[in-house]
Amino acid sequence: MSEVLLAAEGMTRRFGGLTANHNVNLSLERGVLHALLGPNGAGKSTCINMLSGDLPPSEGTIRFKGEDITGLGSHQRSKIGIGRSYQRTNIFPKFSVLENCRLAAQSRNPRPWRLFADALRLADTVERARAAIAEAGLAGREERIAGTLSHGEQRQLEIAMVLATDAQVLLLDEPLAGMGSDESAQMVTLLNRLKATRAILLVEHDMDAVFAVADRITVMVNGQVLESGTPQQIRNSPDVQQAYLGH
Ligand code: ADP
Ligand code: MG
């Protein structure tokens, strides 16, 4: 039985005269990695920004487990289990891996540190941060200063920070950008592991990586969904081949 965690219905976003997303329907299920493809400017980041609550849609509805959350901001969405990573890196370079993940874990708590009860919760955030670091494949590197990590490790850290918030939905904007082939392969393995218990939306340009992890693919062009289906359907779609894959 599929469990839809996050769904967009008729999601539209205009910037002045430009329609960056037009009537987008998308659903993210637990256990499924859904890849979002499309050329630069297609509207992929705008789509993620609306799903994460960073950007309000002009029209449409966003539901989490069936409940309308269109009006919730990104902080509130993070608390209910929707996490994201950014196209550009978002870590604190002078802090350690563990500190970065603790800050992420604490962002779920109200008024961190101020009350005794919050101090007690601190132990819980350390535990959550360590578990997230291990799950993202960075065990043993907790004390490393984030800015000294390799590019691939920094992108793993970003995933760890999302996991530290206990996210069930991971919205990942180009997590493989700038990676070498070894780093990409490792990230693909990680994503395959993470999707077992969560719903993932992956924006990615590397076709080999996408076809290695995606269970479902949506192709956007000019702010609209061109096609959505299984990797096999997308690979064989004449529309997709003509409009995007370039052959
Ligand atoms: P992608 O991530 O697929 O490359 P984006 O979602 O970033 O595409 O952008 C889609 C379109 O919306 C582009 O034409 C972009 O210039 C425009 N756009 C994105 N964000 C804004 C913004 N904050 N203000 C104005 N235009 C924007
Ligand atoms: Mg983008």
Image: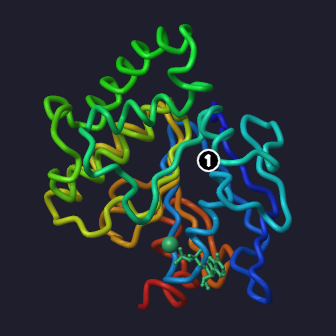
Residue 109: % across, % down: 57, 25
- Image-quadrant location for residue 133: top left
The mark tally for this picture is 1
Q: Is residue 165 above or below residue 57?
A: above
Residue 90: % across, % down: 40, 55
The type of residue carrying mark 1 is: Leu
The residue nearer to you, when weighing 58 against 115, is 115
The residue nearer to you, when weighing 110 against 61, is 110
Does label 1 point to a residue whose CB lies under 8 Å from ligand 1? no
Q: How was this image coloured?
A: rainbow
Which quadrant does the N terminus fall into? top right
The residue wearing badge 1 is: 28
Residue neighbourhood size for the residue with mark 1, other residues' Cα within 10 Å, grouped as few (<14), some (14–19), many (≥20): many
* Residue most extreme to the front: 114
Q: Is residue 40 left or right of residue 16?
A: left
The residue nearer to you, when weighing 221 against 46, is 46
Quarter of the rendered structure image containing ligand 1: bottom right
- Image-quadrant location for residue 219: bottom right
Residue 240: % across, % down: 54, 81
Q: Residue at x 30, y 53 (%)?
A: 155
Q: Is residue 154 left or right of residue 7?
A: left
Residue 145: % across, % down: 19, 43
Q: Secondary structure at mark 1?
A: strand
Which quadrant does the C terminus fall into? bottom left
Q: Residue at x 23, y 59 (%)?
A: 184
Q: Is residue 143 above or below residue 37?
A: above
Q: Residue at x 47, y 64 (%)?
A: 203
Q: Residue at x 58, y 80 (%)?
A: 42
